[in-house]
């Protein structure tokens, strides 16, 4: 590993306090996060999995949508960096009493946290908070907009297996319309030079998807043909208000990733899924548990990538120095 | 700018330190060598090679990045964080005698951070400190066990160690800061 990488990344650090999306990151910034995550991954293999880097920093995990993987992953990352963490879940927050997001955030901020990790069902919620809060804002998924740390951990996992992203054929199959993971991944993969194919029922294509510089098809065999990476997206029934396809069984028959379909990909192709998986809908169990599946590696790498993001953002934005 | 050590001098110095290590530890049994990134690692690898030549036995070698243990990490004015590199210690340090290697010993703060980082990997039998240059001006009670060259400096000067592996040349240079 690391053969193409030099000892020192080209960039000396992130000059921002928020991570709102992949769209605003440069390729150099993305590579800096991935390189930093490589160093962070080693910490998870130590007998004492903790470093003092963020000692005395307070991080609030503010989750307005259910989440197990992402919230746990952020919390472990924060703890491994010695930050103090605070979890606020919607069910126990004042939101159920009618408080607005902005008021909730300003009240939390009055208690001087350093960073807020936000998940919200509205696209743009993180941008709103970044404008009104002094704390750094990390987007842990906002509506159908972006989920930047997921795309970063996906890229990290691909690079770990394939040593590169440039020139790889990546097929992303599933519910394209409702997926923030898709949007973040498209931004990231195209910035780093991958050949991205997206596939799903035409009813689940976002409007002008081709503007993103990807190839769109509804023929799953075409998308998978010769792919280095096959990434599946969950069918997000909870976001669907209407009939996008006749039945889950029919979806599986036409788009489900089976062993037969996966044979069209390269022999060393890897299978990814951001979770939670619906076995028998977007992915067959034999594929999810197969030797080419890196789904659990993605989860493991998520901690290292989030440690890297927390560490890099903790320095804040340079333009604040004058203030 | 003046060159205070050239390639020959550095090479002879490292061989001398290697002999001191073998003498003091009565061989290389139970030793492991850990360099502080970046140039401490290069020096550590060179000493490991000399130890192999002299004692005929390989000594486990590792690399330590101390960035996350720096005492000024979150104290500096707002700005980009220092670049983090991999720590690689592919052996247990428990009950070993660890030779910790850095290029320049100055305030002692890097060594303090390195000691904290090492202890997170286990409980070594002992830690001995090797530096190529000791330039004085300690701010913490830290002393090297093996010193390549004692170099009296003023705080306005900077000492730069350049090594083939990272800089394409072997030399130690004393410069006026400005």
Image: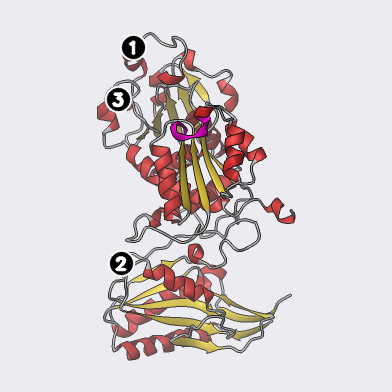
* Residue drawn at 65 percent across, 57 percent down: B78
Q: Which residue is mark 1?
A: A250
Give me the chain letter of mark 3.
Answer: A
* Residue drawn at 62 percent across, 52 percent down: A316
Q: In this orientation, which residue lies closer to the viewer: A57 or B28?
A: A57
Sequence-first tag of 1 and 3:
1
Above/below status of B21 relative to A253 = below
Above/below status of B33 relative to A253 = below
Above/below status of A236 relative to A146 = above
Q: In this orientation, which residue lies closer to the viewer: A261 or B117?
A: B117
Residue B34's x, y, as percent? 40, 73
Left or right of A219 in this view: A267: left
Q: Which residues are magenta?
A: A90-95
Magenta part mainly helix, strand or loop?
helix
Q: Which residue is mark 3?
A: A279
Residue A109's x, y, as percent? 60, 44
Q: How many marks?
A: 3
Residue B73 visible in the displayed image: yes
Say few, some or many: other residues with alpha carbon within 10 Å of mark 1 (under 14 / 14 to 19 / 20 or more): few
Left or right of B116 in this view: B156: right
Are discs 3 and 2 located on one and the same chain?
no
Are discs 1 and 3 located on one and the same chain?
yes
Q: Which mark is residue B91?
A: 2
Q: Are marks 3 and 2 in contact (CB under 8 Å)?
A: no
Q: Which mark is residue A95?
A: none
The quarter holding residue A22 reads top right
Q: CA distance from mark 1 to mark 3?
A: 14 Å
């Amino acid at each position: 590993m690391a053969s193409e990488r030099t000892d020192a990344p080209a960039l000396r650090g992130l000059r921002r306090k928020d991570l709102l999306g992949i769209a605003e990151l440069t390729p150099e910034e993305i590579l800096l996060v991935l390189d930093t995550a490589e160093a962070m991954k080693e910490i998870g293999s130590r007998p004492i999995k903790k470093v003092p880097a963020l000692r005395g920093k307070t991080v609030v995990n503010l989750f307005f949508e259910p989440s197990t993987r992402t919230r746990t992953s952020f919390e472990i990352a924060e703890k491994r960096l010695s930050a103090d963490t605070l979890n606020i879940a919607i069910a126990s927050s004042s939101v159920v009493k009618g408080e607005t997001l902005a008021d909730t955030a300003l009240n939390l901020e009055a208690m001087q946290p350093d960073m807020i990790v936000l998940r919200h069902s509205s696209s743009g919620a993180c941008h709103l908070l970044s404008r009104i809060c002094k704390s750094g804002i990390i987007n842990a998924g906002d509506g159908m907009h972006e989920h930047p740390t997921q795309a970063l951990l996906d890229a990290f996992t691909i690079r770990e297996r394939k040593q590169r992203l440039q020139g790889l054929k990546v097929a992303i199959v599933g519910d394209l319309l409702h997926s923030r993971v898709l949007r973040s991944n498209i931004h990231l993969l195209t910035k780093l030079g991958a050949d991205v194919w997206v596939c799903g029922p035409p009813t689940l294509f976002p409007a002008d998807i081709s503007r993103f510089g990807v190839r769109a098809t509804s023929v799953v065999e075409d998308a998978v043909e010769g792919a280095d990476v096959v990434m599946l997206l969950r069918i997000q029934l909870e976001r669907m208000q209407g009939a996008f396809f006749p039945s889950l069984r029919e979806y599986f028959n036409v788009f489900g990733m089976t062993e037969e379909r996966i044979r069209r990909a390269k022999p060393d192709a890897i299978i990814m899924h951001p979770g939670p998986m619906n076995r028998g809908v977007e992915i067959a169990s034999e594929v999810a548990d197969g030797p080419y599946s890196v789904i659990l590696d993605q989860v493991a790498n998520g901690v290292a990538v989030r440690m890297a993001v927390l560490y890099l953002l903790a320095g804040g934005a340079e333009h604040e120095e004058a203030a | 700018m003046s060159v205070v050590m050239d390639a020959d001098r550095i090479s002879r110095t490292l061989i001398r330190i290697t002999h001191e290590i073998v003498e003091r530890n009565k061989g290389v049994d139970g030793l492991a060598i850990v360099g502080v990134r970046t140039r401490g690692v290069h020096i550590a690898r060179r000493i490991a090679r000399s130890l192999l030549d002299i004692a005929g036995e390989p000594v486990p070698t590792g690399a330590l990045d101390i960035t996350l243990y720096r005492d000024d990490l979150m104290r500096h004015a707002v700005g980009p964080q220092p670049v983090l590199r991999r720590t690689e210690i592919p052996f247990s340090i428990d009950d070993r005698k660890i030779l910790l290697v850095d290029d320049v010993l100055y305030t002692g703060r890097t060594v303090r951070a390195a000691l904290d980082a090492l202890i997170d990997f286990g409980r070594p039998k002992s830690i001995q400190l090797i530096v190529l240059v000791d330039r004085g001006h300690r701010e913490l009670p830290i002393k090297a066990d093996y010193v390549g060259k004692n170099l009296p400096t003023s705080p306005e000067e900077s000492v730069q160690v350049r090594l083939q592996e990272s800089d394409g040349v072997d030399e130690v240079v004393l410069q006026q800061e400005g």
